[in-house]
Amino acid sequence: MAATGAAPHVLPERRVRMFITASVMLATIMQVLDSTIANVALPHMEGSLSATQDQITWVLTSYIVAAAIGTPLSGWLAGRFGRRQVFLISVVGFTVTSVACALSTTLVEMVGARLLQGLFGAALVPMSQATMLDINPPEKHAQAMAVWGMGVTLGPILGPALGGWLTDAYNWRWVFYVNVPIGLVAFFGIYAFMSETRPVARRLDLFGFTTLSIAILGLQLFLDRGEVQDWFGSIEIWIELLTAVIAFAFFVVHTFTVRTTSFFNRALARDRNFVSGCCFYFVMGAVLYATRALLPPFLQDLMGYSVVDAGFATAPGGAGSMLAMMMAGQLLGRFQARTLIAVGFSISAFSLWQMSGYTFEMSESTVIWSGFLQGLGLGLISVPLTTATFSMLDPMLRGDGTSIYSLSRNIGSSIGISFVQAELTRNTQVAHSSLVEHVNAFNPLLQGGASHWQTGSASGLAALNAEVTRQASMIGYVDDFRLLMLLALCIVPFVSLMKPERAKHPHKTR
């Protein structure tokens, strides 16, 4: 069998290709699942790890930061040491650190294990994408990206449901133990069926990597810590933002002025479809992850759903994504990729419009239907977007390209989540102040026997304030869904930036 990625035109046999696909997708699902599966278990971890609510968020932050820093390095590692070797080390490291997370007894141990878990897992998603593109001929890329997209998209959607069930049925440590059987199967599959790529002697641009890593670190800390530290009212947040801006400025200047090979391959910037695709993937990450960050607390805190019920109410979004991805491979033969991307964003915007009409009286079917439609829209975006993004890219650039592509989604999701959380807090406060203005003795709903609130007692006033806060929170969530809807709509006209056809002679890298 030819080396995977070394000669993309020489294909493995169908059965071997199937085993490779299953193995790399298991590794991918394992990594993306851990980006959300631990969210619902955080309250249960607080007591076990003797951590406060503020401190326990580092369990999520440490993983996100480490994965973001390690993602752009995956292309260089795979090219320098061989994709198979890096894949095997990443799977082993991720599995072992998952066990370390499960066995942690203090917050320091947990954060350290999550940092290592994020670093080892960073290469899994971009390398799996590059592998899927390499082992399939160009005419099969749409179907291959449908399979890959299912894993990447379904992981964040199904994570809360699986995490909630494991936490309820067993305990929070099982959200990490679940990676062990997946990791073992993925390791043996990759070891047995995947051939090694041909390593290329390539010097690491240490300055470029360092400045980009510092920029990503500063940005992630700024986004994750901003809500807790009251944003620009904190010196810490200013330091993190300035660090990110200055480091990124150094990275950009260095990348486009250095005469030797830079960490970011400049040939990627010359491919219009690749650059446009990364921008669209950024927006898709923001919409998907921001919505997934809003729905669980909305359903649990406001609507009274249990952890498990909230997970199952949002799970149909995954069914919508699967259906759309299975259809997208066939639709690409009839419609241009950019047409399907525009339709996908439009459907996502429609689903968010439905979410902006949520009320306390709505049924669970409303949540399920709007989530299913959003999954349908995002699934319809994923396959055509990935196919179009890499359609004109030189196969030799896929390793670097997939790492930057994944990084764009990670940064988009971080910015999207931080933005909607900040807006939720602000809009809830504004709505609360506005509603309180109408709580007075002249309001007929609060007068005499018509009032259900005993405003003459402290307990009655507390109950009334709790109801006002509940109503204000609903307004805050609805406003967030409306903002995401506008974001999805505004991006639609820009799909025309992507070239509608594939180039027969892709650009060659220098």
Image (cartoon, helix red, strand yellow):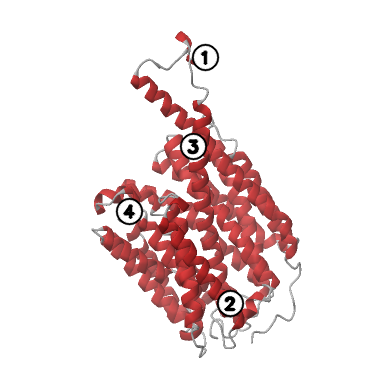
Q: Which residue is mark 2?
A: 253
Q: Residue 230 vs residue 152: left or right?
A: left
The residue lying at 45 percent from left, 44 percent from top is 296
- CA distance separating discs 1 and 4: 45 Å
How packed is label 2: few (under 14 Cα within 10 Å), some, or many (20 or more)? few
Secondary element at tag 4? helix
- CA distance separating discs 2 and 1: 64 Å
Q: Are marks 1 and 3 in contact (CB under 8 Å)?
A: no
- CA distance separating discs 3 and 2: 42 Å
Indicate the quadrant containing the C terminus: top left, top right, bottom left or bottom right.
Answer: bottom right
Asked which quadrant contains residue 182, the reply is: bottom left
Q: Which residue is mark 1?
A: 442
Image position, residue 508 (x, y; %): 67, 84
Q: Nearer the viewer, residue 258 or 90?
A: 258
The residue lying at 56 percent from left, 55 percent from top is 286
- CA distance separating discs 4 and 2: 37 Å
Of the residues under marks 1 and 4, which one precedes in the sequence? 4
